């Protein structure tokens, strides 16, 4: 069930469909974007749907999604982990970023309750300079 929800999640994310995301993501969602503090404006912990929306807006204002591919989806208990790779374009510089990523989702009540992002933050920071 959680894997199917993630397909809807990634489609809504790609389309910037916050109405669909509000149906998929819990109101008290917690986002953890790992990286050195201050390296990227969105690194850190974002709690609640409003903070989640601000987080996504910051990312969308800085980056264009060129391609994202899921390589493996692993589900265990309340968690689904997505291993993948992607390519983004920095809007301010036009530079492309190609990196591997790991996204971890914890589900509660059929909705995304926690979202953790692990990726090459240094590559994003360099492309945004």
Image (cartoon, rainbow, N blue to C red):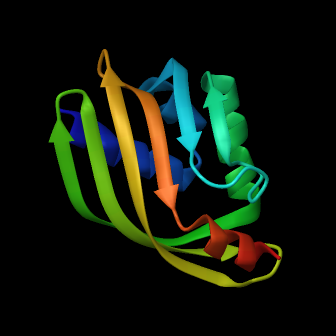
Label count reads 0
Q: At 75% across and 59% down in the image, what residue appears?
A: 39
On-image quarter of the N terminus = top left
Q: Where does residue 65 sit, x and y in percent of width and height?
A: 56, 67
Residue 123 in the image: above or below residue 46: below
The image quadrant of residue 46 is top right
Q: Is residue 52 visible?
A: no
Q: Nearer the viewer, residue 92 or 125?
A: 125
Where does residue 82 sit, x and y in percent of width and height?
31, 53
Q: Can residue 117 be seen in this view?
A: yes
64 left or right, relative to 2:
right
Instruction: Work out whether residue 13 or residue 82 is closer to the camera in this orientation and state it.
Output: 82
Residue depicted at x 49% and y 50%: 117
Q: In this view, does 70 lie to the left or right of 103?
A: left
- Quarter placement of the C terminus: bottom right
Q: In this view, does 106 lie above or below 92?
A: above
Tell me residue 43's x, y (percent). 68, 48
- Position of 37 with respect to 92 (left or right) is left
**Residue 41 point in image, percent of width and height:** 77, 52
Instruction: Name above or below for residue 24 compared with residue 72.
Output: above
Q: Is residue 120 shown above or below 50? A: below
In the drawing, does residue 20 fall left or right of residue 65? left
Image point 75% across, 83% down: which residue? 94
Q: Between residues 12 and 58, which one lies in front from this camera angle?
A: 58
Say which quarter of the image contains residue 47. Answer: top right
Farthest residue to the bottom: give it. Answer: 95
């Amino acid at each position: 069930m959680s894997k199917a929800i993630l397909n809807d999640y990634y489609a809504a994310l790609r389309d910037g469909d916050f109405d669909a995301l509000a149906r998929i993501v819990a109101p008290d969602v917690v986002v953890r974007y790992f990286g050195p503090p201050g390296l990227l404006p969105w690194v850190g912990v974002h709690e609640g749907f409003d903070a989640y929306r601000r987080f996504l807006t910051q990312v969308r204002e800085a980056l264009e999604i060129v391609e994202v591919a899921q390589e493996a989806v692993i589900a265990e208990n309340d968690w689904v982990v997505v291993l993948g790779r992607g390519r983004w374009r920095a809007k301010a510089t036009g530079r492309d970023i190609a990196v591997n990523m790991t996204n971890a989702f914890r589900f509660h009540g059929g909705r995304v309750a926690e979202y953790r992002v692990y990726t090459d933050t240094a590559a994003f920071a360099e492309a945004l300079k």
